[in-house]
Image (tube, rainbow, N blue to C red):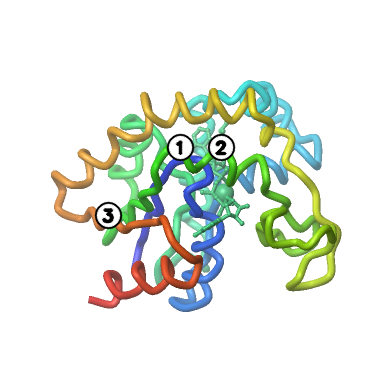
């Protein structure tokens, strides 16, 4: 199954993607994670991506599309994949149509007003990548899953998040209509407990 997870920054794409990839035994491909890996390793793609990500802007389509095209050609994607954070523009969606067929697009829907708190409170495990929220950490700064140290993403400050939300509304939200027209859109209420949202998604996908 080739699946796209669509949703605003902080909607829970990464949180759900980890669980969905394990359930359906398909690779979780997050363009944000790929960019952050490249930034950490100071590659040319990383340096370029950083200049956009730090400002809350999208990395240019041609760069992002090339990375995804190459990633989907890898062997582990033969039986399906789960895209998290791609496509994010209609141009990217059109490019993807040219090299892969999508079975389902899960649109994780969360009221925009709830996202700022979710993102600014996010702490990510530097070891396993799991997302946590300060409200549930009880003052500790260690990952409940693997014991790794938790860090805050450089783009998770209020100012950058505000820009990311604006970019989402103007450039990414129109993708819901794009996939609705194709008959593959599954909109799921993403407001609720993580497990609850997971069940809503799998219920729709299992059909
Ligand atoms: P990316 O890394 O994709 O960031 P994003 O889309 O802004 O989304 P987030 O990762 O912030 O949120 P999420 O939906 O994964 O939420 P999470 O599960 O962590 O992209 C970063 C940047 O890279 C972009 O701004 C852009 O510059 C660039 N980029 C990436 N892809 C690109 C593309 N295709 N084209 C161009 N540029 C691209 O959850 C968030 C928080 O909420 C966590 O603290 C979590 O614990 C909590 N939470 C999760 N679920 C729930 C729940 N049900 N209830 C309460 N809290 C919850
Ligand atoms: Mg994410």
Q: Nearer the viewer, residue 61 or 105?
A: 105
Residue bearing the label numbered 2? 116
Q: Position of residue 77 (x, y in %)?
A: 47, 65
* Along the line of sight, the residue nearer the viewer: 68 or 164: 164
Ligand 1 image-quadrant field: top right
Is 134 positioned to the left or the right of 42 in the image? left
Seen in the picture, residue 97 relative to 126 is either above or below; the reply is above
Q: Which residue is mark 1?
A: 113
Q: Secondary structure at mark 3?
A: strand
**Depth check: 176 or 197 in front?**
197
Residue 13 in the image, given as x and y percentages of width and height: 49, 54
Q: Is mark 3 within 8 Å of ligand 1?
A: no
Say whether marks 3 and 2 touch (CB < 8 Å).
no
**Residue in the picture at 50% in, 62% down:** 17
Q: Where's residue 133, x and y in %?
A: 67, 55
Which is nearer the eye, 75 or 5?
Answer: 5
Could you say whether the residue bearing mark 2 is in a helix, strand or loop? Answer: helix
Q: CA distance from mark 1 to mark 2?
A: 7 Å
Q: Which residue is mark 3?
A: 187
Residue 97 marker: none
């Amino acid at each position: 199954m080739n699946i796209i997870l669509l949703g605003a920054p902080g909607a829970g794409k990464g949180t759900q993607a980890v669980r969905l990839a394990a359930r359906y035994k398909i690779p979780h491909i997050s363009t944000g994670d790929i960019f952050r890996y490249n930034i950490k390793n100071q590659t040319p793609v990383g340096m370029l991506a950083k200049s956009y990500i730090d400002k809350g802007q999208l990395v240019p389509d041609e760069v992002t599309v090339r990375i995804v095209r190459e990633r989907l050609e890898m062997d582990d994607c033969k039986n399906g994949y789960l895209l998290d954070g791609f496509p994010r523009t209609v141009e990217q969606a059109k490019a993807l149509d040219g090299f892969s067929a999508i079975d389902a697009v899960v649109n994780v829907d969360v009221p925009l007003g709830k996202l700022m708190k979710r993102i600014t409170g996010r702490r990510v495990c530097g070891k396993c990548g799991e997302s946590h929220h300060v409200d549930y950490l009880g003052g500790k700064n260690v990952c409940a899953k693997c014991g790794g140290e938790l860090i805050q993403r450089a783009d998770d400050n209020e100012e950058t998040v505000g820009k990311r939300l604006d970019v989402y509304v103007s450039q990414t939200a129109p993708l819901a209509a794009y996939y609705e027209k194709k008959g593959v859109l599954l909109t799921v209420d993403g407001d609720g407990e993580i497990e609850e949202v997971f069940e809503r998604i799998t219920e729709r996908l299992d059909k």
